[in-house]
Image: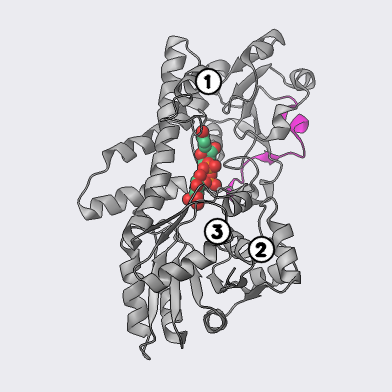
Amino acid sequence: MKTINIGMIGTGYVGLTSGACLAHIGHNVICVDNDEAKIKTLLRGEIPFYEPKLDQIVKENVQNGRLKFTTKISEAVKASTVLFIAVGTPPKETGEPDLSYVENVAKEIGEAMTDYKIIVEKSTVPVKTGEWVHETITRYNKRNIPFDVASNPEFLREGSAVGDFLEPDRVVVGVESEKAKQIMLDVYAPINGPVLVTDIKSAELIKHASNAFLSTKISFINAISIICELSGASVEKVAEGMGLDKRIGPSFLQAGVGYGGFCFPKDIMAFIRIAYELGYDYRLLKEVERINEEQKDRFVKKIEGLLWNLREKQIGVLGLAFKPNTDDMRFAPSIDIIAKLTAAGAKVKAYDPHSMDNAKKIITNIEYCNDPYEVVKDCDALAIITEWEEFKKLDLTKIKSLLKLPIVVDGRNIYDPKTMEQMGFIYRSIGR
Ligand code: UGA
């Protein structure tokens, strides 16, 4: 294999995972972040967030010298041929992504370049951002150094990002020159998975279209779950029956309290916005968003329906992160659900195995507990919001004896309705 010198600018979930994994497959990688405290943490071999397996890969590759960290973009530019831009693209009030971080990095790269570079968009950006990156680098590249822009969207899921990187369903590379194509193929040569080479705009669009489609699948099954509740069918059986059709597939058909995280909600907003700017009103995606919001409302109404009123009721919440195996609270359904519960006068006690430190910064008006049993003690109802493995193995007899009323409202369908009823619980789940 050819070893490539790579600069990874931005050490968030995407940048750090991609940088560490590229070092792991044999390249020399310098990760850059302007947050000095973060770089110090990483140099100590600590990871600033929870992501299974990532700490080990970072540690190994720092030790073998293939993974380095710096706060200076110019250092990475000097040492690398391929520069990935993996900085944040947070949503503005209007829903469109804030691309000023991407612009600043492009500017700094343009100023620092002294020999040929490929500048790769890794952050999720709207279609046609590549043109702006190209334009910005050209403006600041006073010495007229040759360069190429490329798009290489990431498809990593938090909680299984390392596995997704090393064994991907596909790698998408958008390029506009043969030289850039060859180097990008060298970067991914050690990875066992199909590589799709496209033009830059198509690569950019593949990312937004994929996340939009997956969100649509989730809202679709959530809408089906409502019809199941109204008709007496089971959403799990319906999803199983649909998923056996190879054209549909079984994944992303789990009904629940809706999707969250820093990808789907942000990307759907951005995609609706970019489509509008291009001249298309993407009403299908607006409906996907609306169904997702409605799902949280319906969950709270289910709890209220069992308790008559929420005022002064004590509700136990298990699970705060937007999904299991992450400590990420960004756009987590728990935030809106708890806000609705407390706005209606309920008191909330909560527990999450990994996200409580992050949750405490966002949700300040609830009591945080050390374990699930402390949560349920003297509660009028228990609400399950995230399907952590730990919650599937709880001692339900103990849970029942600790609850004031044996009411469980399960937003992720982790328990069997028959068993729960036999145990004497008043049990409600989603679409069953
Ligand atoms: C998602 C995509 O799956 C990745 O491919 C993509 O790279 C990433 O966004 C990104 O754009 O960076 P992630 O946000 O980590 O990854 O999480 P997912 O596992 O996709 O779950 C997203 C949300 O959908 C979670 O809240 C989850 O609970 C919910 N979900 C997922 C359901 O409600 N039902 C399902 O069947 C699947």
Question: Residue 14, which numbered label?
Answer: 3
Q: Residue at x 44, y 45 (%)?
A: 265
Q: What are the residue bounds of the magenta stretch?
A: 362-378
How many circles with numbers are drawn on the protein?
3
Query: Which amino acid, mark 1?
Result: Glu
Quarter assignment of residue 61: bottom right
Question: Residue 43, which numbered label?
Answer: none
Q: Residue at x 67, y 72 (%)?
A: 66
x then y, percent, for residue 43: 71, 71
Which element type, helix, strand or loop, lies under badge 1?
Answer: helix
Q: What is the CA distance from the residue labelled 2 to the residue labelled 3?
A: 15 Å
Colouring mode (rainbow / by chain / secondary structure / one colour): one colour
Asked whether residue 96 appears in the rendered view, the answer is no
x then y, percent, for residue 291: 39, 32
Question: Residue 24, which numbered label?
Answer: 2
The disc, 1 or 3, on the residue closer to the chain's N-terminal end is: 3
The disc, 2 or 3, on the residue closer to the chain's N-terminal end is: 3
Residue position marked by numbered label 1 in the rendering? 236
Sort mark 3 into few (<14), some (14-19) or many (20+) by Cα contacts within 10 Å: many
Is the residue indicated by label 3 positioned so its CB lies within 8 Å of ligand 1? yes
**Is residue 311 part of the magenta span, yes or no?**
no
Figure quadrant of the N terminus: bottom right
